[in-house]
Amino acid sequence: MNTAYSPYGYRRTQPAPITVLGFTGQFLDGVLQCHALGNGRRLYSPCLMRFISPDVLSPFLKGGINAYAYCLNDPVNGLDPTGNWPIFRNGARPVGRLVQRVASLYKSLTEDRGLTNNQYWNMAEEMAHAKAQVKKASTQYRVVTSKSGFEQLDPGLNHKFVFTQEEKFVVFSSRDDPTMPSHGSLAEFSGLGYGTKGLGESVISAGYVFIGDGGKISLNNHSGHFQPPFENLYKLSGFLEGIGVEVNYIRAFGS
């Protein structure tokens, strides 16, 4: 046997140039000496033992770190969130805020319609359950309008949220997630509609709020009633920035 396999490809057991490294069954470009992995989306150099191009189709919006960011020789202040060009922390926040504002404006001009409650026929029953849960304090309902509103969310509870086109951020909080009222009924509470439509039609984002160590806030897009796309979480950027809250966005499984 004259080959041995490793996480980086394979190599001969006897001394040989590093250029013989590679992956079996993967096409190797003879000019670049790189594998085009992921159906040709990303170049991998077996000699350098790392990717040499960003992952432009990463499911995470800031995925695909640039392998050559270390060449800036400033690992503390330098960063490369997209893998395409380096920026520095003193300029990253203003640029990031500008990008978010432009994206938010573009989406507001091109996507006027809200999300659809795909279980609207259960609204009467769900509203009855929600009102009963809130009345006996098994579920807490609150409208969050400031940073302190997020700080009041108990890390030990489960929190569902709905965000409307009117920029109203409403939350149901409960210790027992399976019996907590639905996102659909939470949307009705947002406008006190108590009917079959209410302000549910104006929902533009929905999901869960997570309070982590040190009060770190994360939001995901998990909602069976509205099934919002992950990108809809970014429609909260203007509201959250306005009240001075920083959050992490998490993609719900399967979205």
Image (tube, rainbow, N blue to C red):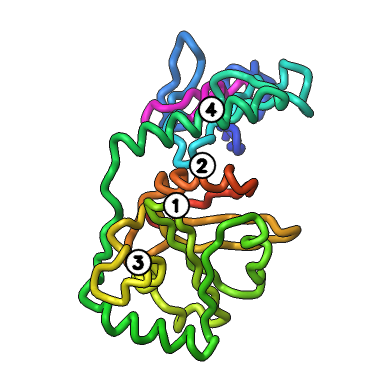
Sort mark 4 into few (<14), some (14-19) or many (20+) by Cα contacts within 10 Å: few
Q: Amino acid at mark 2?
A: Gly
Is 50 colored magenta in this rendering? yes
Against 35, residue 253 (above or below) is below
> Nearer the N terminus, badge 2 or badge 4?
4
Q: Amino acid at mark 4?
A: Leu
Residue identified by numbered label 2: 238
Residue identified by numbered label 4: 98
Q: Are marks 1 and 2 in contact (CB under 8 Å)?
A: yes
Percent x, y of residue 61: 49, 37
For the residues labelled 3 and 1, the Cα–Cα distance comes to 21 Å
> Nearer the N terminus, badge 3 or badge 1?
1
Q: Amino acid at mark 1?
A: Glu
For the residues labelled 4 and 3, the Cα–Cα distance comes to 32 Å
For the residues labelled 1 and 4, the Cα–Cα distance comes to 19 Å
Percent x, y of residue 99: 50, 28
For the residues labelled 1 and 2, the Cα–Cα distance comes to 9 Å
Q: Nearer the viewer, mark 3 or mark 1?
A: 1
Is 114 colored magenta in this rendering? no
Boundaries of the magenta span: 39-55
Describe residue 25's horizontal placement relative to residue 70 as left or right: left
**Quadrant of residue 7 within the rendered picture:** top right
